[in-house]
Amino acid sequence: MLTAEQLLAAHRSNMNAVFGLTGKVFETWEKLAELNIQTAKTTLNEVAETTQAALSVKDAQELMALHASLLQPTAEKAVAYSRHVYDIATSTGAEFSKMAEAQVADAQDKFGSVVENATKNAPAGTENAVALVKSAVAAANNAYESVQKAVKQASEIVENNVNTVTNTALKTSQVAATRVPKRAAV
């Protein structure tokens, strides 16, 4: 059986984990807010510059050239912003995963200790039941490890897909930017 001290220690550990996760959530919000404020400031300055440039255009060809000069940098900035958001989310997810893994490992250790104590104090003739419980615990641990491996593999696949989409978007914007001036000259 668990003692009052063990229960209190478990409760304290759980509360520390909750406060740790809450702190990470606020850190993430802070990072996203900083990114959004910086993006808004930069965008406002760029809009002012672009407006001034557009107001000084003298003909359609200059306007098309201005448009072409803005196309690729705008796409690159959008991709960079998305990448920053993705990086913030990924790092937060990784921190949450580490905390969760630590909590699960601690719970597994404690449960393993409880099972071990119970098996040591099991009455004679319950060896089969004890073996069954130990086998079930081992199977649960193996299943958890398999799920963890699958989640890590899925995360790697998502990371690769994000990189591929990002690179494709940048290449597409580069091709589009090089084609716009050619059309303007026609």
Image: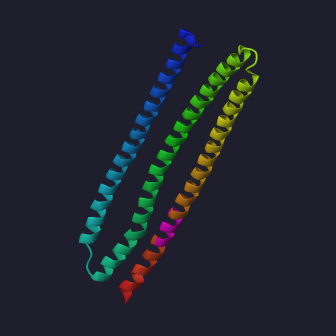
Q: Looking at the image, which residue sits at the far bottom? A: 186
Measured from the top left, where is residue 39 in percent x and y?
A: 36, 52
Would residue 153 appear left or right of 54 to someone viewing this image? right
Q: Which portion, as a residue range, is magenta?
A: 166-172
Residue occupying image coordinates x 27% and y 81%: 59
- Colour mode of the rendering: rainbow
Quadrant of the image occupied by residue 27: top left
Residue 98, position in %: x, y? Answer: 57, 35
Name the residue at 67% across, 22% down. Answer: 115
Count the numbered circles shown. Answer: 0
Give the x, y percent position of residue 107.
60, 26
Q: Nearer the viewer, residue 14 or 69?
A: 14
The residue furthest left is 55
Instruction: Determine which quarter of the picture holds residue 133.
Output: top right
Quadrant for the C terminus in the image: bottom left
Say left or right for 129 vs 184: right
- Res. 184 image quadrant: bottom left
Identified at 72% across, 14% down, the residue is 123
Give the quarter of the figure containing the N terminus: top right
Indicate the position of residue 56 as horizontal and vertical percent values. 25, 72
Q: Is residue 65 magenta?
A: no
